Image: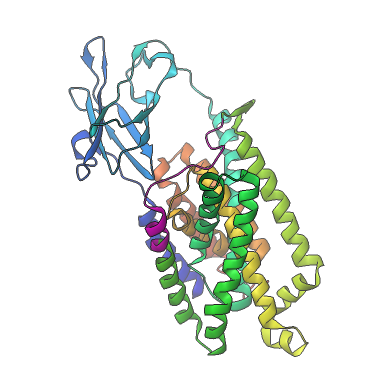
Amino acid sequence: MLAILFVTLLTALTMATFSVSSAQADEVGTEYDFTLSGNVKFNGEALDGVAVAVDGNGYQADTVTDAEGKWSIGVPEKGTYEVTLDEETLPKGVVVAKGGNVIDAEFGLTDRRSVNFFLGEGTRNTVSFFDQFVNRFVNGLNFGLLLALAAIGVSLIFGTTGLSNFAHAELITFGALMTLVFSVQLGLPIWLAILIAIVLSGALGYSLDAVLWKPLRRKGVAVIPLMIVSIGLSLALRYLYQYFFGGSTSQLPGAGMADLKFGAISLSPIDLASMGISIVVLLAVAYFLLRTRIGKATRAVSDNPSLASASGIDVDNVIRIVWVVGAALAGLSGVLWAYFRPGVSWDMGFQMLLLVFAAVTLGGLGTAFGALVGSLIVGLFVELSTLWLPSDMKVVGALVILILVLLFRPQGILGRKERIG
């Protein structure tokens, strides 16, 4: 029943994750006051149906040129936007000169910014399907690892308390925002800012449990009301972030580094560091759960809280530690997510929440190792599905896999019918 509830909620949330869909040039962003526009011509002839996309400041939109070769996209605010022309939509034999199909466009004093691409004759260099598959597989693995950091926290909290914490999204955002504050605004080294953000994330988890969740547990509030409280907390924190940090997207130091080539694989130094950090942290979490006294107590509480309490285990203390660890992992995940997107924004955790719950449900509710397996599957499928599906449909693809697995194994891949740790 709970799995069905998750699938319903996840499907509903999918609609909130889509970016602006394709439309004709005169239909995109007309509600905004700022406009990016251009005219795509070759040898004086207008090119119709050429796809152009805009991405930046937390906003995405795309359109195609009209019969006169013109395109126009409205944007919500002034700033720098990445404008991309899809070379695959150009006529045969026409290419963008020097491969410059991506232009960073910045608004000046006016409300309009003209962006023009220089076209020429030539043959487009295409990447083989195998090379694309390998590159996206590695990127999917990177995404799956950072997704696992957030999903394990959700799974541990559910395993010990039975709470499906929708406010976990804001713990993810909190880690990225604190890194932005200490690195960009206060000028600290990025490594130190990340460490501070993780510590503060753990402290936030501790505070939320002490002030909110523990009193509610002691009053015997049922699981469904607790979940509703978490949704309200999520909304309150999210719009509190927007109030203090605004609606724009900011970059962390080091974002946008040039990619390194390893054959068909293209990764930035940040991507390599992200994968390495994720693997080390996940191994540390596995050691914590399997080898340490607190970890074994956590699994015992997850299996049977009443029996664990009768055995002398301080259940409240274990739950408090789980909240600290889960929040710290979420904060680290938010930092890595900010580099992967890239960018820090007030609602970035919510954009990731759908996939976090999909990973947890797919792997098995309440099991940390199931959350890891589910995250890797979701991460790989999200990236690999873009080989066949439009990029704004990749979340739907992940949900299809989730639904298919639950049809044949409702408890998830590693889950048991009873709740486990």
| Nearest the eye: 19 or 384 | 19
Left or right: where 377 falls relative to 17: right
Q: Residue at x 49, y 52 (%)?
A: 398
Compared with residue 125, is residue 154 higher up or lower down, i.e. above or below?
below
76 magenta-colored: no
| Rendering coords of residue 201 (x, y %) | 59, 62
Which secondary structure type mostly characterizes the magenta part of the structure?
loop
Q: Which residues are magenta?
A: 239-257
244 magenta-colored: yes
| Nearest the eye: 363 or 152 | 152
Left or right: where 85 falls relative to 288: left
| Rendering coords of residue 238 (x, y %) | 42, 62
Q: Residue at x 50, y 85 (%)?
A: 222
Q: Taking the image as drawn, is residue 145 in sight?
A: no
Compared with residue 153, is residue 191 higher up or lower down, i.e. above or below?
above
Q: Taking the image as drawn, is residue 115 in sight?
A: yes
